[in-house]
Amino acid sequence: MIPKPHGGKLVNRVVTGEKRDRLVLEAEELPVLSISYERAVDVVDIAHGVFSPLEGFMVQSDYLSVLHDMRLSNDLPWTIPVVLDVDPDEISGIKEGDYVALKHGETIVAVVRIDEIYGWDKREYAEHIYKTLDLRHPGVAKTMKRKELLVGGLVDLLNEIEYPVKHRVLWPIETRVLFREKKWERIVAFQTRNVPHLGHEYVQKAALTFADGLLIHPLIGWKKPGDYRDEVIFMAYEALIKHYYPRDTVVLAGLLMNMHYAGPREAVHHAIVRKNFGCTHIIIGRDHAGVGNYYAPYEAWTIFNEFPDLGITPLFIREAFYCKKCGGMVNEKVCPHGEEHRIRISGTAIRDMLRRGKTPPEYVMRPEVARAVIEAGNPFIE
């Protein structure tokens, strides 16, 4: 059966009808907080149930519990704080119990009831979430630029935001309906921010050997420079699915969510989110959501030992490589041959080739996929 959402209930804070009309009018008279694109994405994710059971930005008790114990204050697993940062002068004159309008660009996105205003230690946050204070870590650099206070409170979404490939996004209520229509019961999620190479295809198809269906779920939202553009990821996956997957075994849908590069903590976060989308399993990479060398090998796997009550099953499929002797993609559990026969897939090398308009070897990437990426022009975020 499709699992229940995290915490048992799929959150819906999207306001419609007469209530929305009333709140839109009231929002014009409220104090306004301007928010970044990343925080606007968080608002939308809260409202659409991506972050169930959260119904708003975290109050201090939940924030500290997540930071130190990787659980909400009610003991439910949660690993990445979802917080709204503000400057003291922005919040001057506003007290707990008041309502404020959240504005991104020219759009009033949401109304928030202020339940709590509190301070935070950004260095403490970085040390716990990213395990480093190194400003070369993209998540640490982002954190240190955030504002000095945090606001917790319930969110009411009034207006959707604009974002790339909007027509590709499905929300949890939509994927759950889709999976039921397909009569899928075992659904495997695959998180990605890259175009697919044969190693990705190998682990996806390994999962499909026992599952009813696969949700390929590219992340749309803030990513670091050098990552693939959203449109390019979809074009590449469409080419792969069209030529190399059986019909009706794959759903390709965008996930609007920010990337943190928080390694093991983010691996658990990605699992919780996919549970809300209706998935029963999620493929977890050896260095899932990692960047640089900030996390130990396989740390993104061992962290799941701390969460026997997660409600979604992680799949730890070992890194695939091409074995010249086997004549195909394998991993160390099924290939007996020495390192001299193995060709490891390097994401960096693939990027370099694609950036120069060169097609990677066919034992690394399907030619149709490479062609889709190259024909897209510059495939990378500047």
Image (tube, grey):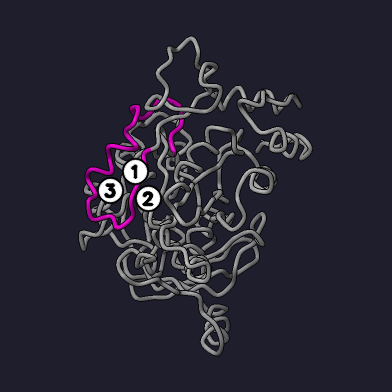
Q: Is residue 242 left or right of residue 192?
A: right
For marks 1 and 3 on the same chain, the one whose residue lies earlier in the sequence: 3
Find the distance from the CA under tag 2 to the CA under tag 1: 6 Å
| Chief SS of the magenta region | loop
Picture disc at residue 265: 1
Residue displayed at 35% across by 43% down: 122
Find the distance from the CA under tag 1 to the CA under tag 3: 10 Å
Amino acid on which disc 2 is placed? His
Verify CB contact (< 8 Å) between mark 2 and mark 1: yes
Q: Is residue 149 visible?
A: no
Q: Position of residue 22 (x, y in %)?
A: 54, 87
Q: Secondary structure at mark 1?
A: helix
Mark 2, residues whose alpha carbon is within 10 Å: few (<14), some, or many (≥20)?
many
Q: Position of residue 47 (x, y in %)?
A: 47, 69
Magenta span: 289-316
The mark closer to the camera, 1 or 3, is 1
For marks 3 and 2 on the same chain, the one whose residue lies earlier in the sequence: 3
Q: Indicate whether 351 appears above or below 17.
A: above
Residue displayed at 33% across by 27% down: 296
335 or 278: nearer the viewer: 335
Residue on which disc 2 sits: 269
Amino acid on which disc 3 is placed? Leu
The mark closer to the camera, 3 or 2, is 2
Residue on which disc 3 sits: 67
89 or 158: nearer the viewer: 158
Mark 3, residues whose alpha carbon is within 10 Å: few (<14), some, or many (≥20)?
many
Residue displayed at 44% across by 57% down: 187
Verify CB contact (< 8 Å) between mark 1 and mark 3: no
Q: Secondary structure at mark 2?
A: helix
